[in-house]
Amino acid sequence: MTQNKKNLLMDLGILFVSIAFAIWLSQSEMFANFLLATRESKIIGSLFGGLLFTSIFTTAPSIVLLGEVSQNSSIWQTALLGAFGALLGDLIMFKFLRDRVAKDFYQLFHVNMQKERIFRLPRFRWLAVLLGGLVIASPFPDELGLAILGFSNTKTNLVIPVSFVCNFLGILVIAFLATRV
């Protein structure tokens, strides 16, 4: 078994554990009490939830956390602070993890190096930024969106506003839905 396949299987295992943890977290009375304890926990909860919102391994618990926080505070505050946390998480991933994640996605989708070069062509860069931004805004893991931005050699000074705005919109939708359900 190749190292990429081992990494992919390990990633899928961690994803399964993450979803199970999110289910447990959503049903935990202790977690709800923690969030309601102080005003500061809402701020910290939003920032931490945003930070967790970026990774495939922590997206599910993050959605639970952001939903709980938004039910007891402003959805705008939750989205704004969550977007700052998510931006921090995205920048960390974009700088340090994009090469390994890109290899795993190449392995998953059987993409060869010739096909990935299409993202580097000037006419496709806007498409890569749009597609990467849509993935970042969705509850799907930001690794894929960041990998798309990385494939196209998107500069960090463009990744920052794309990440912030798209995460803000994604978290705002989660917060809105959590307050309506």
Image: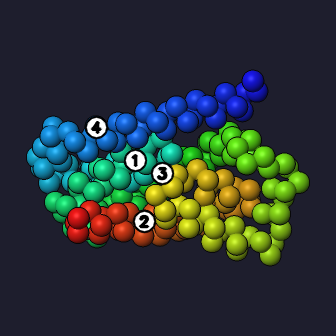
In the rendering, which numbered label is found on residue 60? 1
Per the model, the C-alpha gap separating discs 3 and 2 is 11 Å
Question: Pointer 3: residues within 10 angstroms few (<14), some, or many (20+)?
Answer: many
> Which residue is more in the foreground, 14 or 132?
14
Q: Would residue 133 be found to the left or right of residue 137 on screen?
A: right
The picture places residue 1, in percent across and down from the top left corner, at 75, 24
In the rendering, which numbered label is found on residue 54? 3
Per the model, the C-alpha gap separating discs 4 and 1 is 11 Å
Question: Pointer 4: residues within 10 angstroms few (<14), some, or many (20+)?
Answer: few
Of the numbered discs 4 and 1, the one sitting upstream in the chain is 4
Q: Which amino acid does label 3 sit on?
A: Thr
Of the numbered discs 4 and 2, the one sitting upstream in the chain is 4
Q: Which amino acid does label 2 sit on?
A: Gly
Residue, disc 2: 170
Q: Would residue 108 be found to the left or right of residue 69 on screen?
A: right
In this view, 123 is above or below 90: below
In this view, 91 is above or below 176: above
Question: Pointer 1: residues within 10 angstroms few (<14), some, or many (20+)?
Answer: many
Residue, disc 4: 24
The picture places residue 124, in percent across and down from the top left corner, at 77, 71
Question: What residue appears at the point 49 percent right and 62 percent down from the top-left corner?
Answer: 138
Of the numbered discs 3 and 2, the one sitting upstream in the chain is 3
Question: What residue appears at the point 34 percent right and 42 percent down from the top-left corner?
Answer: 22
Secondary-structure class at tag 1: helix
Secondary-structure class at tag 2: helix
Per the model, the C-alpha gap separating discs 3 and 4 is 20 Å
